[in-house]
Image (spheres, helix red, strand yellow):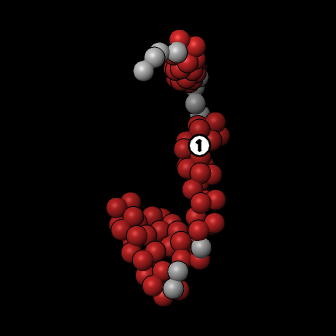
Amino acid sequence: MTLDWLTLVTILGMAGATYLTRVAGFWMIARLSLKGRLAAALEAVPGAVLMAVIAPTILLQGPAEALAAAVTLLLAWRLPILVAVIGGVASVVLFRLVLGA
């Protein structure tokens, strides 16, 4: 196996750029006073990103998965996350059996 220097430099450059953007973000946030709407918006970002990734997958799989996602969401709203995960897994199995999917 040979080492391609251009590939290695490209990978190291991308790693450095990723590291610098993360460090710069932490550095900038540490110097801001987060209050009110800005704090609420930044706290909502992880959930919004997660939903943006998960929602298309859930909705394209089928009715059993979409219904199980709704059940999981309702469980997570009121119960601990472990209970919601177990309920979600159980509900997708149940919906697949009932709907024949």
The residue drawn where x is 39% and y is 75% is 90
Extreme residue in the front direction: 1
Residue 56, image x, y percentages: 64, 59
Nearer to us in this view, 80 or 49: 49
Q: Secondary structure at mark 1?
A: helix
Query: Relative to the observer, which residue lies in front, 33 or 88?
Result: 88
Q: Quadrant of residue 91?
A: bottom left
- Which residue in the structure is indicated by mark 1? 45
Is any atom of residue 19 visible in this view?
yes
- Quadrant in the picture for the N terminus: top left
The picture places residue 77, in percent across and down from the top left corner, at 48, 65
Q: Is residue 97 above or below residue 57?
A: below
Question: Position of 69 compared to 56: left or right?
Answer: left
- Where does residue 54 sit, x and y in percent of width and height? 57, 56
Q: Residue at x 45, y 64 (%)?
A: 76
Q: Nearer the viewer, residue 81 or 68?
A: 68
- 78 vs 70, nearest the viewer: 70
**Residue at left offset 48%, top offset 80%:** 96
Question: Where does the image place residue 79, in percent across and percent down from the top left?
Answer: 39, 66
Q: Is residue 30 visible?
A: no
Q: Return the residue found at the far bottom.
A: 98
Residue density around tag 1, few if under 14, some if 14–19, many if 20 or more, within 10 Å: few
* Amino acid type indicated by mark 1: Val
In which quarter of the view is residue 44 placed?
Answer: top right
Count of numbered circles on the image:
1
